[in-house]
Amino acid sequence: MAPHAACNVLPLSLCLAVLGLTPAPLHSTMAHMENEMTFGEFVANLPLLDWYYDMTDDHQAYLRGSRQIQSYRELAESKGGEWVEAFEKESKKWTI
């Protein structure tokens, strides 16, 4: 599939919608994440997070993105080791 021009300027969720794709569901609660998310799921979900949440003008999108990143950071820190490494590696990819 050829990249769509909108993917250069839209958040990932909107880009996927333009392409007619659905991202893997992101787990919404920390308890659910800690008890049920595998390392593979964690790594697969990292690119789907809203890493640019702090660039939005929409306060609700900002809050949602901030909570999402914080939840994944806390999960990585609670699991330690490769989880922290994976989170930090993905985080660096999205740094401007």
Image (cartoon, rainbow, N blue to C red):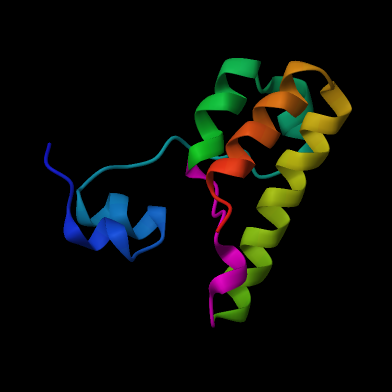
In the image, farthest residue toward the front? 96
In the image, residue 69 above or below residue 14: above
Q: Looking at the image, which residue is at 73% across and 23% down?
A: 83
The C terminus lies in quadrant: bottom right
Q: Is residue 30 left or right of residue 60?
A: right
* Nearer the observer, 89 or 21: 89
Q: Is residue 15 left or right of residue 23?
A: left
Find residue 14 and report its horizontal and vertical position in percent. Answer: 34, 60
Q: Looking at the image, which residue is at 62% across and 80% down?
A: 59
* Nearer the observer, 25 or 63: 63
The span shown in magenta is: 48-57
Find residue 33 and report its horizontal and vertical position in percent. Answer: 72, 31
In the image, farthest residue toward the left? 2
Find out whether residue 56 is within the magenta segment.
yes
* Nearer the observer, 93 or 50: 93
Q: Is residue 17 left or right of residue 1?
A: right
Q: Main secondary structure of the magenta part?
A: loop
Residue 8: quarter of image:
bottom left
Find out whether residue 90 is within the magenta segment.
no
Find residue 86 and report its horizontal and vertical position in percent. Answer: 65, 26
Q: Looking at the image, which residue is at 54% across and 42% down?
A: 93
- The total of numbered circles placed on residues is 0
Find residue 61 and report its horizontal and vertical position in percent. Answer: 57, 70
